[in-house]
């Protein structure tokens, strides 16, 4: 599988993964048939996996492959919904200006 741009990295992989599973339906239709459980422990998993106690959001730009890998692992484990790694992604917590967040 090739590399994706930051904008399409996860969504592109998710589309391919869901197509392989034959689940390319709209979320509204999916929810009529099933429930989705969301787990917000991305930061905990990130810290355990990479041994880093800093905000995982600070690595979105510096180590995007790490973020893609974690999301791939979620998909491979059967996840049908991915949440963005942006819980604490703001200028104050990341210590940067508006231009750096774009």
Image: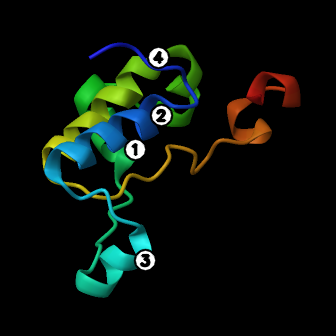
Residue 73 % position (x, y): 20, 37
Q: Can the viewer see residue 74?
A: no
The residue positioned 34% from the left and 54% from the top of the image is 41
Which residue position holds label 1?
43
Circle nearer the N terminus (4, 3) = 3
Residue lying at 53% horizontally and 20% vertically, measured from the top left:
5
- Which element carries disc 1, helix, strand or loop? helix
Quadrant position of the C terminus in the picture = top right
In this rendering, which labeled residue sits more in front, label 4 or label 1?
Answer: 4
- In front: mark 1 or mark 3? 3
Q: Position of residue 46 (x, y in %)?
A: 33, 35
Q: Position of residue 61 (x, y in %)?
A: 58, 21
Tell me the residue at 65%/41% (across/down): 89
Left or right, residue 45 beside residue 56: left
Per the rendering, the mark at residue 56 is 2
* Mark 4 to mark 3 CA distance (whole Å): 33 Å
Q: Considering the numbered disc 2 on the image, is that residue within a helix, a strand or a loop?
A: helix
Answer whether labels 1 and 2 touch (C-beta < 8 Å).
yes
């Amino acid at each position: 599988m090739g590399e994706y741009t930051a904008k399409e990295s996860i969504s592109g992989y998710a589309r391919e993964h869901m197509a392989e599973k034959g689940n390319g339906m709209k979320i509204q239709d999916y929810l009529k048939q099933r429930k989705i459980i969301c787990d917000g422990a991305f930061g905990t998993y990130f810290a355990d996996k990479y041994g880093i106690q800093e905000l995982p959001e600070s690595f979105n730009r510096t180590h995007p492959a790490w973020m893609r890998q974690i999301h791939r692992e979620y998909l491979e484990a059967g996840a049908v919904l991915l949440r963005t790694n942006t819980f604490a992604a703001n200028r104050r917590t990341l210590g940067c200006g508006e231009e750096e967040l774009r």
